[in-house]
Amino acid sequence: ITLFRKFFSFLYKFMYKIVQILTGIEFPCEIEIGSNFRIDHFGCIIVSGFAKFGNNCVIRHGVTIGLKNIEDPGAPTIGNNVDIGAGAKLLGKIKIGDNVSIGANSVVLIDVPSDSIAVGIPAKIIGRKK
């Protein structure tokens, strides 16, 4: 069984690296993903294995979703219907609510409540008009 496990671990790591090189996307198998998850404009996308995505999420080119500090292995938890713009960075153990838009090139370091927009560096939260 140990040899069997080592073989498949090696195979996973090898295939993971091939996919990473061919697509430019680092997307570990530990990530929790809801239904209808979509990556638009592939390439330069890095997602931490600790991240969690709700349903109907979209991420675009150049997005980084990961750890803020190496000592704190917490990554964002992203709600349903979240649209993450190109080049956005979501860092740390933060919560992104439902129906949120993250602007292009925004750096999000704080929680974002549902039904809002996060834009800027560092991101400022703007409520959506109903």
Image: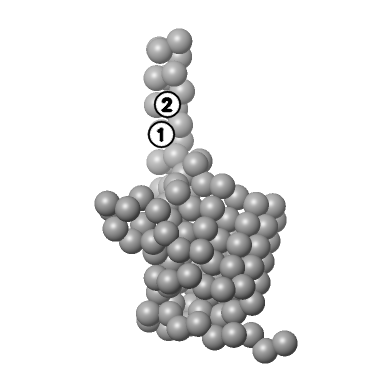
Instruction: Examine the image and state in which quarter residue 99 appears.
Output: bottom right
Q: Residue at x 58, y 56 (%)?
A: 53
**In the image, residue 92 lies at what x, y percent?**
39, 61
The residue singled out by tag 1 in the image is 13
Label 1 element class: helix
In the picture, the disc for residue 101 is: none
Residue found at the very far right of the displayed protein: 130
Q: Nearer the viewer, residue 29 or 100?
A: 100
**In the image, residue 125 lies at what x, y percent?**
50, 82
Residue found at the very far bottom of the displayed protein: 129
**In the image, residue 28 lies at what x, y percent?**
46, 44
Res. 17 visible in picture: yes
Res. 42 visible in picture: no
Other residues around mark 2 within 10 Å, as few (<14) / some (14–19) / many (≥20): few
**In the image, residue 15 lies at what x, y percent?**
46, 35
Other residues around mark 1 within 10 Å, as few (<14) / some (14–19) / many (≥20): few
Q: Residue at x 40, y 34 (%)?
A: 13
Instruction: Examine the image and state in which quarter residue 120 appears.
Output: bottom left
Q: Is residue 101 left or right of residue 55?
A: left
Label 2 element class: helix
Q: Residue at x 60, y 62 (%)?
A: 79
Q: Is residue 89 above or below residue 118?
A: above
How much space separates mark 1 and mark 2, taking CA atoms? 6 Å
Q: Amino acid at mark 1?
A: Lys
The residue singled out by tag 2 in the image is 9
Q: Is residue 79 above or below residue 127?
A: above
User: In the rendered view of the protein, which quadrant contains the C terminus?
Assistant: bottom right
Q: Nearer the viewer, residue 20 or 124?
A: 124
Q: How is the image coloured?
A: one colour
Is label 1 in contact with label 2 (beta carbons under 8 Å)? yes
